[in-house]
Image (cartoon, rainbow, N blue to C red):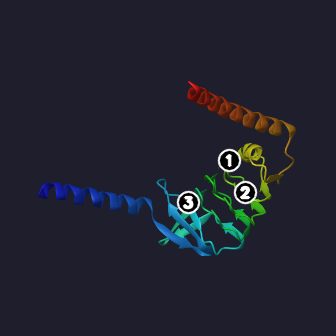
């Protein structure tokens, strides 16, 4: 019995130590809450519902006296922040998570850095019309654009050329066809 208690205490201490190393949290300026991921980069986890107007996501944040590069806007980070009108994301951020801006009903503009490589298809669910200022290098956004009917893309480093549009549309068509086949497969299973 005593031996099992010692093991349990040891396991709990290991878990607490691991959590303290991998999830240092702190509120930063502007009502944005960050954590440090397993790679030593900052992830924007949430935004205070009292935030309004223009919100700037910085390239670095200080947490407990140490500076971290902001790489990710996490899942549901701005969920329901209804009073935000613009979001300006600094260079260095590489990904936007699931439903990151869901139900940000006043959001009308977002500035995306050239470093962004990943944006989830449902990042802007429940939002009104949004003007996205992005770069040709943000190829992922052109695919997201194919799924979201509320985005207006503005390519700041030139025009969206016809080849990029065709490629993005063909990828969207392939993904839609794939999911249609999966749905048909499961419907057929249900009939048997």
Which residue matches tag 1? 121
Left or right placement of residue 99 versus residue 108 in this view: left
Q: CA distance from mark 3 to mark 2?
A: 16 Å
What SS does tag 3 mark? strand
Q: Label for residue 43?
A: 3
Which residue matches tag 2? 112
What SS does tag 1 mark? loop
Residue located at (64% from left, 75% from top): 50
- Say if 38 sits above or below 161 in the image: below
Instruction: Say which of 41 and 110 sits in front.
Output: 110
Q: CA distance from mark 1 to mark 3?
A: 19 Å
Residue located at (63% from left, 74% from top): 30
Q: CA distance from mark 1 to mark 2?
A: 15 Å
Residue located at (18% from left, 58% from top): 6
Which residue is most to the front? Answer: 191
* Mark in the foreground, 1 or 3: 1
The C terminus lies in which quarter of the figure? top right
Instruction: Say which of 152 and 140 sits in front.
Output: 152
Q: Where is residue 105? Give x, y as percent.
A: 73, 64
Q: Earlier in the sequence, mark 3 or mark 2?
A: 3
């Amino acid at each position: 019995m005593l031996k099992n208690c010692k093991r349990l205490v040891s396991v709990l201490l290991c878990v607490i130590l691991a959590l303290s190393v991998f999830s240092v949290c702190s509120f930063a300026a502007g009502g944005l809450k960050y954590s440090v991921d397993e790679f030593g980069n900052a992830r924007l986890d949430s935004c205070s519902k009292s935030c309004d107007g223009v919100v700037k996501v910085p390239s670095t944040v200080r947490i407990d006296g140490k500076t971290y590069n902001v790489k990710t806007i996490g899942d549901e980070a701005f969920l329901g922040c209804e009073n935000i009108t613009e979001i300006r994301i600094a260079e260095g951020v590489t990904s936007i998570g699931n439903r990151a801006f869901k139900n940000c009903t006043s959001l009308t503009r977002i500035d995306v850095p050239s470093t962004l490589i990943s944006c989830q298809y449902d990042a802007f669910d429940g939002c009104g019309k949004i003007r996205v200022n992005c770069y040709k290098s943000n190829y992922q956004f052109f695919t997201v654009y194919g799924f979201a009917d509320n985005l207006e893309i503005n390519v700041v480093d030139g025009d969206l050329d016809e080849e990029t549009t065709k490629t993005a549309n063909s990828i969207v068509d392939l993904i839609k066809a794939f999911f249609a086949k999966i749905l048909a497969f499961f419907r057929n299973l249900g009939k048997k």
